[in-house]
Image (cartoon, helix red, strand yellow):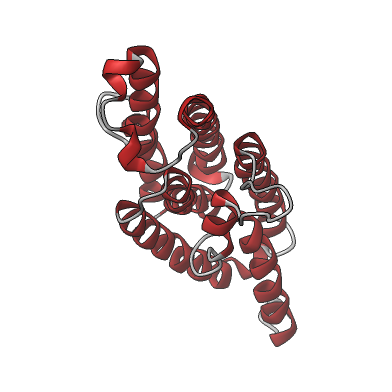
Amino acid sequence: MYNSPGISIALIFITVGIGFKLSPAPSHQWTPDVYEGVRNPLFDSNSPTPVVAFLSVTSKVAASASATRIFDIPFYFSSNEWHLLLEILAILSMILGNLIAITQTSMKRMLAYSSIGQIGYVIIGIIVGDSNDGYASMITYMLFYISMNLGTFACIVLFGLRTGTENIRDYAGLYTKDPFLALSLALCLLSLGGLPPLAGISMNPIIAIAQDTLF
């Protein structure tokens, strides 16, 4: 019963639906375009940055909470199947998201691909589950991600209001113009990147240790 084709099909469809909200690879194609926004000819503007910041946080938090309930309870007896599926998504997300983020010229698109890589760590917490502090690790990581992500978008909003641009090259020399904004943005970005001794480097091992104890 628990290994029936019907359950497998249901698992695939549910994973696709949740994946659209979490935007892991390979269901991530919409994320960079939404973050950057498509220029509206009526208003001659892109997606407002505060709205993008709101979507980048709420959609992932809601989808993560739904995934923990759906995969842990209805599919408890099919854990082997969805563990493998989520592990593939996590690995693809961490590799593709971080590599493609390096090549971007738009700050918003870079954050979009960075969020794809970050969600790979969240998926690991979902895989580990309630045992081995998997959910606790995931919640801790999400709190860190939310705070640093909102901080980064706040800096982008301030920079955009002053310069009217979002190109990464235009951030050159920011420290000479506004040291506080430059330091705040650097702190948030380096934390998201996991550079020691900032918050990001302490969050990644929490997820990794929980995953290691599972096996």
Image spot of residue 181 (x, y percent): 40, 18
The quarter of the picture where residue 2 lies is bottom right
| Residue 4 falls left or right of residue 131 | right
Tell which of 177 and 124 is nearer to you: 177
153 in relation to 167, above or below: above
Residue positioned 70% across, 66% down in the render: 17
Image spot of residue 4 (x, y percent): 70, 84
Image spot of residue 205 (x, y percent): 34, 38
100 in relation to 7, above or below: above
Count of marks placed on residues: 0
Tell which of 110 and 14 is nearer to you: 110
Residue positioned 31% across, 58% down in the render: 99
Residue positioned 50% across, 47% down in the render: 122
Quadrant in which the N terminus appears: bottom right
Q: Which residue lies furthest to the bottom in this view?
A: 5
Image spot of residue 82 (x, y percent): 57, 68
The quarter of the picture where residue 150 lies is top right
Q: Which residue lies furthest to the top in this view?
A: 180
Tell which of 135 and 21 is nearer to you: 21
Residue positioned 32% across, 14% down in the render: 179
